[in-house]
Image: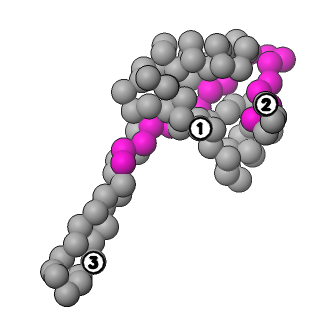
Amino acid sequence: MSLIIKPVISEKANYLTDLRGTYSFLVNPKANKIQIKKAVEAAYGVKVADINTMIYAPKVSSKYTKKGLQVGKTNKLKKAVIKLVEGDVIDIFAVN
């Protein structure tokens, strides 16, 4: 089970990285904070100081077609905002 899905690369996430030194990741919705901490420390070789998590509900959309009402939804998402110990950095854009 892969806990870290991908880093969040947005204007707000980059601003918070520069301002507070926090990094945002999309993670598996079933993962808890302890599992996320261990996964980030193992993947990036850094020490995690604090984790905040947010669960985003699925977005539902509907449209009318010839066949009637078509309803669809996206998947549930969980975002983790991770604060590292002073002096540690993660290079998200590094090419492996």
Nearest to N terminus: mark 2 or mark 1:
1
> Circle 3 sits on which residue?
63
Q: Disc number at residue 96?
A: 2
The image position of residue 64, as x and y in percent, is 23, 82
Secondary element at tag 1: strand
Q: What's under tag 2, amino acid-wise?
A: Asn
The image position of residue 6, as x and y in percent, is 59, 38
Do residues under tags 3 and 2 come within 8 Å of each other at their CB atoms?
no
Q: What's under tag 1, amino acid-wise?
A: Lys
> Circle 1 sits on which residue?
6
The Cα–Cα distance between marks 1 and 3, rounded to whole angstroms, is: 30 Å
Secondary element at tag 3: strand
Residue 78 lies in what quarter of the image? Answer: top left
**Residue at the image point whose x is 36% and y is 54% from the top:** 74
Residue 88 in the magenta stretch? The answer is yes
Tag in front: 3 or 2: 2
Do residues under tags 2 and 1 come within 8 Å of each other at their CB atoms?
no
